[in-house]
Amino acid sequence: MDSLDARRQQLIERFPEWQPSSLGDWLGTCAAQYSDRPLVITDDRTLTYRETAEWAARLADGLVALGVRPGEHVGVLMANYPEFVPVKFAIALAGAVAIPMNFLYRTEELAYVLAQSQARVLITMTGFATLDYPGMLDTIAPGWETGVTEQLPLLRTVIQVPANGNIRAGVRTLSDLESLGIGNASAAQGISVDPTGVGDILYTSGTTGSPKGVLITHDAVLRTGYASALTRAFGDGRRILFSLPCYHMFGYVEGLIAAMMVGGAVIMQAAFDPVRYLAGIEAHRADDILCVPTMTVAILEHPDRHAYDLSSLSAVLSGAAPAPVWLWERVRDELGATEIVTGYGMTECGGAMTLTRPEDSFELTATTVGTPKSAGAAGLSDGMLVWYRTVDPATGEVLPEGAEGELVSHGPTSMLGFWDKPEETARGLRDGWVFSGDLGRVRPDGYLEITGRSKELYKSGGELVMPKEIEELLTAHPEISQAYAVGIPDDRWGEAGCACVVRAPESLIDTDAVIALCKARLARFKVPKHVVFLEASELPTTPTGKVQKYKLVAQLKQRLEQL
């Protein structure tokens, strides 16, 4: 096997000078180079680069024939189906801005994003699991099938993708859009797209409140994907399996865009299931999987994991939350992957900005979130994708090197701002620096340590408590799989600590044992007053596995009030 450095050198030679490109042009470049290679693989269908590019061109012509103009917003409400990829690139070819939406939104959430984003066209599945999207639209904007409504005056067209739901009569389907494109061939051909212009409005997952639409350029997405491939030392034709949604940066950039940098393929699954991951690795010879720690644990804990041929698997990216050394050791020993990395980032920065390296020790992978991605000519003057420093969370004053504070970043992939939210933009983007809301420090070796969220800190009896310290103590215990510490309103203490614990399989650990562990290792004011045990499935999470602590607080308050 080629060494990691040799693979990286091949990528650097492939991109000796970074040339900004629009997403549509980038697909065309890849299709010319990798024509008959698979790009999208599912159990039911495979699309080559050429087939994807041709399908995207027909759909783009259809969008233009529908009246979509450059700069207009097109919503996409779709799971990880093969159609997502040509639809996504078609919007770019038409010069429009894509708004990939969380397909698990409930009615109120979907209504908010449709209105706030000012979408002119919506391409939507008919259904997913128990969700009925035409039914939601009936509630949001009655009469939507026939055109513009009072509730959504800018939304003029809805296009259906038949999936687990009933087709609404009289409403265009994706096949209709393709046919319209065939009848108006080359309608999008003369459209010029600025690579530094907005290509996507990606709505944040909302771990602390309502989602905001992050303005991301075409060039930012491609730089970030290239930096991932370079940092992780992708070999030619890398195959990446994942169920993380493509409406989010994780699946979109770390999966699709990164794979395209080396003529690779994505093996997309619409929902996570450990058996489907294992079967997918075997059936499609996946080199790489994308996970969050809860998914990684579920795969390792599945009793049938040894029944599958995982010999093709060499790499794992498990991000979004920290994980202990033992988890990485089990991934290596039981799944056979040797290139194991974790990372950190946020949509506002352009996705994952830091990664550990495949050659790093497990101690680094467990205690840090890596160092800024290598980006060669696509990065800053030092070849890195981003610069990080820390500031005082209260004043914004720059802190000395190595000091703990709020992490802020600057680089060529940073957002342009939040869509139609000037006040939030002013708070989140200051003088070119993105303010993360995350607490941490930059070590002398350049690696970042995350110590918490500034908005998740709580005060108990006037003392400031950092949840991460409690969480790390508890998750180090072999009988605890996950732990989350939050502050619950308390008449006496202002806020009282509550530890939410997910037991490890067959564990019988109880409240007394959890409290005793904390008392033995923590200052008195940090010891949680409450312990609540939950199943992993009961945790309120974003689609990428991050626990939404503001929702967890509400859930725990309700449970404690019932005791």
Image (cartoon, rainbow, N blue to C red):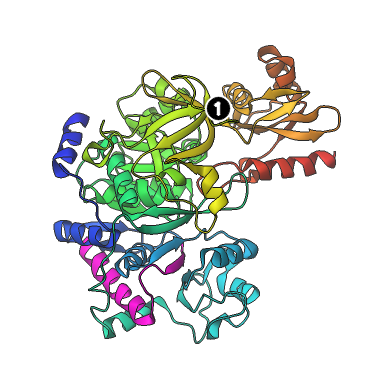
Look at the picture and state if 9 lies above or below 274.
above
| Residue 365: percent from left, percent from top | 41, 26
| Residue 378: percent from left, percent from top | 25, 42
Q: Is residue 29 visible?
A: yes
The stretch drawn in magenta includes residue 76: yes
- Please indicate whether residue 479 sits to the left or right of residue 99 in the image: right
Closer to the camera, 177 or 93?
93
Residue most extreme to the top: 520
Q: Which residue is mark 1?
A: 392
| Residue 111: percent from left, percent from top | 60, 66
Q: Quadrant of residue 63?
A: bottom left
| Residue 171: percent from left, percent from top | 48, 83
- Please indicate whether residue 357 sits to the left or right of residue 439 in the image: left
Residue at screen point 17% across, 61% down: 35
The stretch drawn in magenta includes residue 191: no
Q: Which amino acid, mark 1?
A: Asp
Q: Which quadrant of the figure contains the C terminus?
A: top right
Estimate how packed mark 1 is, as few (under 14), some (14 to 19) or many (20 or more) residues with alpha carbons within 10 Å: some
Look at the picture and state if 286 lies above or below 83.
above
**Overall secondary structure of the magenta stretch?**
helix
Q: Is residue 477 visible?
A: no
Which range of residues does the magenta coloring cover? 49-78
Closer to the camera, 16 or 137?
16
Q: Quadrant of residue 94?
A: bottom left
Residue at screen point 30% across, 51% down: 219
* Element marked by disc 1: loop
Closer to the camera, 14 or 480?
14
- Please indicate whether residue 485 sits to the left or right of residue 185 in the image: right
- Please indicate whether residue 450 sits to the left or right of residue 547 in the image: left
Q: Which quadrant of the figure contains the N terminus?
A: top left
